[in-house]
Amino acid sequence: MDSRRLGWTAALVAVGTAVAMFGGAWAFQRDRVRTLWWTVVVGQGLSEAQGRALEACEELDWWGWLRLLEQGGEHACGYAWARADLARVARTPARQAWLVDGVQPGSRWSMASRFQGALALELAGVVPPQSPMWLALEPGLPAAPTAWVDDVLGEAPGGRIVALRTARELQQEDWTEASGRAVKVLAQGDGPAAAAARQAAMGWLGLADDELVALGRRRPPHELPAPWSDALGRYARCTQGCLPRLLDLVDTLSRDPTGLGQPASPTIPGATLPPALKGLVGSEAAADALAWLVARDAQWVAAGAAPDRRLARLVRRAGPVPTEATAQVWTGRLPPATSALVLLAVGEAAGVPVRVDEGLTVRLGPQEGASVGALCGPAGATGLPTGGDVVVGPEVPLATLRAWARSEQGPVSSADDPVGRRVGEALGRRAVPAHPCPVSGG
């Protein structure tokens, strides 16, 4: 290669290097400029147009949200509106990064701003530094817990508030079998509930997840008592669905504080699962969680001025129906026949008469002034829609109702398929009537 070609090559390399350096420097400066500009913007009050939009609970632009969140985040539009509108404008990585910084523990933001930022991040598909369900229990949040559980997350209150408060208080209190049970109920729920259970366990342990895994994988076996070592090793080896093993580890450390296999306190008997709900869940942990939740839901229903209306809020809530029955009860998003069983179980424990007919129409409360709803009808935003011209017919047998509920939870059993039905009839057993509404019941 002659000297001129070498010179051109060197020049091109130099130009390419300069362009790359300039591009990197410009990207760095652009981020700095943007951060400085946003910092200037947040120091100003809402513009007149932004103030009108906020007062009318209409769409607020990004600059309005910047100012609102940095200045306390208080408004009268409710958290459900804030969640949707902030997620709408927080659509770029830079804006989402700003929200992540604001939601971080110990940030300059108020608790209301941190909660709204976490809600928006979660809706936008970004995992927030702290779960909104966890943040909502902070004393600095200016709203009753029932407001965000019911309106924002679309779940009924009752036992869910008890479980979440118990989990939150574990940061200041000892982990007992009773409080641990509440956390296990959370772990049986979907999404945010399981995240809150994990945060409660990690907060009690006082270690980050990577520290816990490193301890389980690298320490010499003789440094910890055998029960602790075994539980820690099982968690460290886990790669997916590790929350049950994390809770087992916490149980081991709390029940056996000396590591000598001596429980710290007597075992507390579990709650009893109502007969109507037996067979819906397969594991002992799920059955215990379901019994715990039903018992506390019954307390919440009985404590209200209108128990029938509270009972209706526990079932047929709009949204995707979870796969597991315990998660269905947690979210209130249950199929029709399973909803009927839950209403019967909670109603009996709360002293509220419940009648379900063969078409899955349900009457909640005494005949005079009762709430009546169609379980086969559309789900409601805050639970089973009641009222209207609905007539309750002949009562459906509990065995039939349980068969319908089992068919909603998975494949239809052999006794419910055409061949099984004919065999049953030949043996003198009464065939189970067909499900009166679509099994999906979403």
Image (cartoon, grey):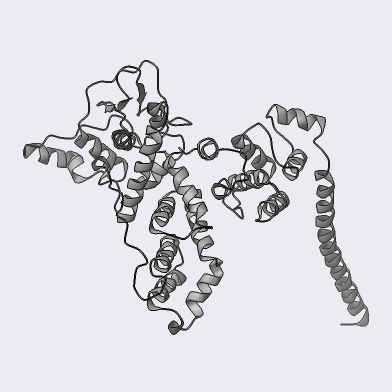
Q: Image check: 63 left or right of 413?
A: right
Tell me if residue 22 can be seen: yes
State whether residue 417 appears in this view: no
In the rendered structure, the answer to whether residue 151 lies left or right of residue 367 reads right
Is 442 located above or below residue 182 in the figure? Answer: above
Q: In the figure, is residue 209 to the left or right of 414?
A: right
Q: Position of residue 422 (x, y in %)?
A: 12, 38
- From the viewer's side, name the closer residue of 280 and 73: 73
Location of the C terminus by quadrant is top left
Q: Residue furthest left?
A: 427
Q: Residue at x 36, y 24 (%)?
A: 373
* Residue at 37%, 38% in the rendered image: 299
Q: Position of residue 115 (x, y in %)?
A: 62, 45
In this rendering, would 347 be left or right of 107?
left
Q: Is residue 139 shown above or below 350?
A: below
- Point out residue 82 in the picture as x, y percentages from the top left corner: 64, 37
Whether residue 421 is situated above or below residue 130 in the rendered picture = above
**Which is more toward the observer, 89 or 101?**
101
Q: How many marks?
A: 0
Q: Residue furthest top?
A: 389
Residue 124 drawn at (x, y percent): 61, 46
Classify the position of the N terminus by image quarter: bottom right
Comparing 115 with 167, the one in front is: 167
Give the residue displayed 38% in from the left and 70% down from the top.
Answer: 256
Q: From the viewer's perspective, is residue 253 above or below residue 382?
A: below
